[in-house]
Image (tube, rainbow, N blue to C red):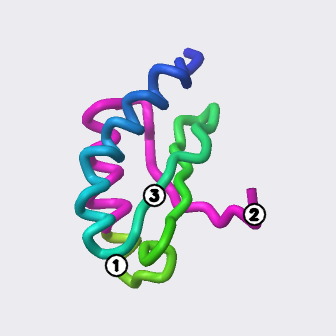
Amino acid sequence: MALNKEEITKKINAALEDLRPFLEADGGDMELVNITDEGVAQVKLLGACSECSMSPMTLKAGLEEAVKKVAPEIIRVEAIDMAEA
């Protein structure tokens, strides 16, 4: 089954918008970079999030949970380094 990436992107961005005030309060942010054909949402960590030791927890417990609620097609969320992309 092919993923409707346009629709999933809207859902993930909406989930990010819900979390953004909490991220920004700590000087950080995240942005959706890509959705793979395998159902992996790739995000870039911005600001304080890019260096924060709690980012893996924020990604798993916060963003991934929120994303899977709105887009169950997504199997995981992972942070990528733009230098790798």
Locate residue 54 relative to residue 9 in the image: left or right: left
21 vs 76, nearest the viewer:
21
State if disc 3 and disc 2 touch (CB < 8 Å): no
- Residue 73 locus on image (x, y percent): 42, 29
**Magenta-colored span:** 58-85
Q: Which residue is mark 1?
A: 54
- Residue 27 locus on image (x, y percent): 36, 74
Q: Which residue is mark 2?
A: 84
Name the residue rendered at 43%, 77% in the picture.
48
Mark with earlier residue (2, 1): 1
Q: Identity of the amino acid at label 3? A: Met
Tell me the distance, in whole angstroms, between the alpha carbons under discs 2 and 1: 22 Å
65 vs 52, nearest the viewer:
52
Q: Which residue is mark 3?
A: 30
Q: Secondary structure at mark 1?
A: loop
Mark with earlier residue (2, 3): 3
76 vs 53, nearest the viewer:
53
Q: Identity of the amino acid at label 1? A: Met
- Residue 12 locus on image (x, y percent): 40, 37
